[in-house]
Amino acid sequence: MLNLTRQEKLVIEFLVLFLIIGSGIRLYRERIRPQPTDKQSEMALFKTLAEESAATDSSASQSQVSPTISATKSAGKINLNRATKSELMTLPKIGAVTAERIIAYRQEQGGFKSVEDLKKVKGIGPKTFELIKGEVTVE
């Protein structure tokens, strides 16, 4: 057999142990949060994670989180007149800058009168509007 010193055996045992632990962690993560296979499921996963994050935020109590979610979401749609920047960023093709522009437009114009007003925001073209018009509402 191999003639290994005590120190060499310890190093090999150490490496094997970490290989097993790493494999176990990877398997655990894949079972808990599987990777999305397409863009829609990726967005659904992102929205779920954002909602979980808001619900478990240590600075907000549970009673404070629920009214916020119900006030900005109606039948699964985001209310353009009440949504926060992070909620707007869950929409397809809407990043931080565009979300800030939506909020700025809302403040300057006194709110959105219709979903069509979203086209007036810089950065939202016809393609982006078509992607998000079914996910937003104005109340």
Image: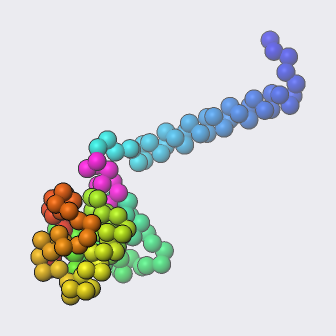
Q: Is residue 136 magenta?
A: no
Image colouring: rainbow
Residue positioned 21% across, 59% down in the render: 128
Query: 67 or 117: which is nearer to us?
Result: 117
Question: In which quadrant of the rendered view does residue 76 lie?
Answer: bottom left
* Quarter of the figure that contains the C terminus: bottom left
Query: 28 or 99: which is nearer to us?
Result: 99
Q: Position of residue 105 (x, y in %)?
A: 25, 80
- Please report the bounds of the magenta region as a residue range: 39-47
- Name the main secondary structure of what is drawn in magenta: helix
Check the image and report above or below for 51 versus 37: below
Question: In which quadrant of the rendered view does residue 69 lie?
Answer: bottom left
Question: In which quadrant of the rendered view does residue 78 lie?
Answer: bottom left
Instruction: Say whether residue 8 is visible.
Output: yes
Residue positioned 30% across, 63% down in the render: 94
Check the image and report above or below for 95 versus 40: below
Query: 45 or 111: which is nearer to us?
Result: 111
* Quarter of the figure that contains the N terminus: top right
User: Left of 72 or right of it: where is 33?
Assistant: right
Q: Is residue 46 magenta?
A: yes
Instruction: Say whether residue 74 is visible.
Output: no
User: Left of 58 or right of it: where is 111?
Assistant: left
Query: 38 or 127: which is nearer to us?
Result: 127
Q: Position of residue 15 (x, y in %)?
A: 71, 33
